[in-house]
Amino acid sequence: MRIRVVNPNTTRVMTDTIEQCARAVTGQGTLLDAVTAEMGPASIESHYDEALSVPGILAAIQRGEREGVDGYVIACFGDPGLDAARELAGGPVIGIAEAAMHTASHLGRGFSVVTTLSRTIGRAEDLVERYGMRRFSRGIHACEIPVLALDTDPAARKIVTEACRDAVDTDGSDAIVLGCAGMADLCEHIREEIGVPVIDGVAAATLTVQSLITLGLRKSGRAEFAPPPPKPYSGLLRSFGANR
Ligand code: 2AL
């Protein structure tokens, strides 16, 4: 099977980390690649960034469909463009927030989310509601490290680890959900340091997609998630129109 992980931001070094973390959990017989969005913001940490990341994600899904990809992961914790991506894809499309929260719900009574900047907390709250996770979510915390600094700030690993430790103590939670794809490579270290399950959504979503494909399950195209009706699009979005 072919799984494609889409990094919705345009920072290639982050795509490389994401690809490594996803490859580390796939089974034999799974061909996995990760692609960087061809257009959009360098990182996604505002509603504006998120909205403008969606065309790049949809272009990646369209290309994947032409290339015979069986399923996709959207590797940004805001799960941008998830519904639209599902309209375009024949196979499963899973967001990392969606997968991480569901995975955490299997491992204890409550989880804490640790995200990047506090301005992203609202979006994470919205996703908790959307995925029916209110019962499991004990708190959402920011470590105040911008997405790209996760890779460049030598103090990032320690700051995120301590934010996770504090979150578990403050919330009385059983598990940590990492709130950014750029934290994927910190997962094992934090798990060892704080001694509770720590869930990286990149790995969790990759295995969810792999499981769904193994089960022979595809996205339901019956109604809402059928391919969108073709129509002309204009301006910079022309290529997303009738002849996509
Ligand atoms: C993210 C993420 O996962 N990728 C990105 O660019 N921004 N999430 C976040 N909470 O900042």
Image (tube, rainbow, N blue to C red):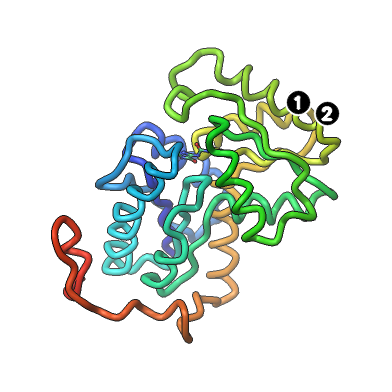
Left or right: 75, with 112 as reference point: left
Q: How many C-alpha atoms fall within 10 Å of the one at disc 1: few (<14), some, or many (≥20)?
A: some
The response on whether ligand 1 sits within 8 Å of label 1 is no
Q: Is residue 244 above or below residue 45?
A: below
In the picture shown, does residue 242 fall above or below 14?
below
Query: What is the secondary structure assignment of the residue under circle 2?
Result: helix
* Amino acid tagged 2: Asp
Q: Quadrant of the N terminus?
A: bottom left
In which quarter of the view is residue 102 placed?
bottom right
What is the x, y in percent for residue 228? 34, 77
Q: Residue at x 46, y 30 (%)?
A: 147
CA–CA distance between discs 2 and 1? 6 Å
Q: Position of residue 90 (x, y in %)?
A: 41, 74
Instruction: Give coordinates of residue 239: x percent, y percent.
Output: 17, 63
Label 1: state its secondary structure.
Answer: helix
Give above or below for 154 relative to 136: above
Q: Which mark is residue 121?
A: none
Q: Which mark is residue 165?
A: 1
Q: Residue 137 in the image: state x and y as whole percent.
A: 75, 47
Quadrant of residue 230 within the rendered picture: bottom left
Quarter of the image that includes the C terminus: bottom left
Viewer-closest of 138 and 56: 138
Q: Which residue is identified by label 2?
A: 169
Few, some or many residues within 10 Å of mark 2 (<14, 14–19, 20+): few
Judge left or right: residue 110 versus residue 183. Answer: right
In the image, what residue type sits under mark 1? Arg
Q: Nearer the viewer, residue 167 or 26?
A: 167
Residue found at x 51% / y 40%: 181
Asked if the residues shown at circle 2 and circle 1 are in contact, with their CB atoms under 8 angstroms apart, the answer is: yes
